[in-house]
Image (cartoon, helix red, strand yellow):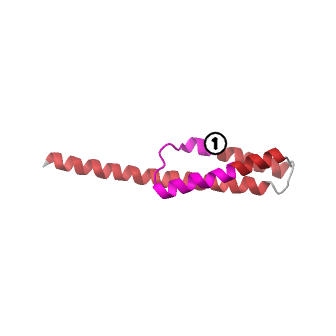
């Protein structure tokens, strides 16, 4: 168990709820990158695998909590980016209807 590892995971663990809350509150995910979130998730999965294979301790709970928060943030990205695309298509079709009249 490393105190530096615990501090790093705690700092990330404190920051993810802010990102999630902002996405839920505004329903706007612009500026978020699904590739970045996926890479972060891969890092957490590898951290969990290291804990399972080499140094199992309670810190694995921090990895799992962070992984779940990032996965939820990624879910919100796809949920809200899809609805934004539908709205923009609806708006453009209404504008097209007005032009055709």
Task: Relative to 80, say whether 43 is above or below.
Answer: above
Q: Position of residue 26 (x, y in %)?
A: 46, 55
Asked whether residue 63 is drawn in magenta, I would say: no
- 70 and 4: which is toward the camera: 4
- Label 1 sits on residue: 39
Q: How many residues crowd around disc 1 within 10 Å: few (fewer than 14), some, or many (20 or more)?
A: few
Residue at 70% over, 49% down: 11
Asked whether residue 21 is drawn in magenta, I would say: yes
> Magenta stretch: dominant SS?
helix
Residue 75 in the figure: left or right of residue 66 = left
Q: Position of residue 65 (x, y in %)?
A: 70, 57
Magenta stretch bounds = 12-39
Q: Residue furthest left?
A: 101
Residue at 65% over, 44% down: 40
Residue 27 in the figure: left or right of residue 49 = left
Residue at 85% over, 55% down: 57
Quarter of the image where one finds residue 38: top right
Q: Position of residue 2 (x, y in %)?
A: 85, 46
Number of disc labels:
1
Residue at 59% over, 41% down: 36
Which structural element holds mark 1?
A: helix
Residue 57 in the figure: left or right of residue 41 = right
């Amino acid at each position: 168990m490393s105190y530096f590892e615990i501090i790093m995971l705690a700092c990330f663990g404190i920051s993810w709820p802010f990102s999630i809350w902002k996405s839920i509150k505004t329903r706007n995910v612009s500026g978020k990158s699904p590739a970045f979130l996926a890479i972060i998730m891969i890092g957490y999965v590898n951290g969990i695998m290291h804990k399972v294979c080499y140094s199992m301790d309670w810190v694995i709970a921090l990895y799992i909590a962070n992984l779940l928060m990032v996965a939820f943030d990624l879910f919100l990205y796809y949920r809200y980016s899809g609805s934004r695309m539908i709205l923009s298509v609806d708006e453009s079709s209404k504008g097209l209807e007005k032009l055709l009249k």
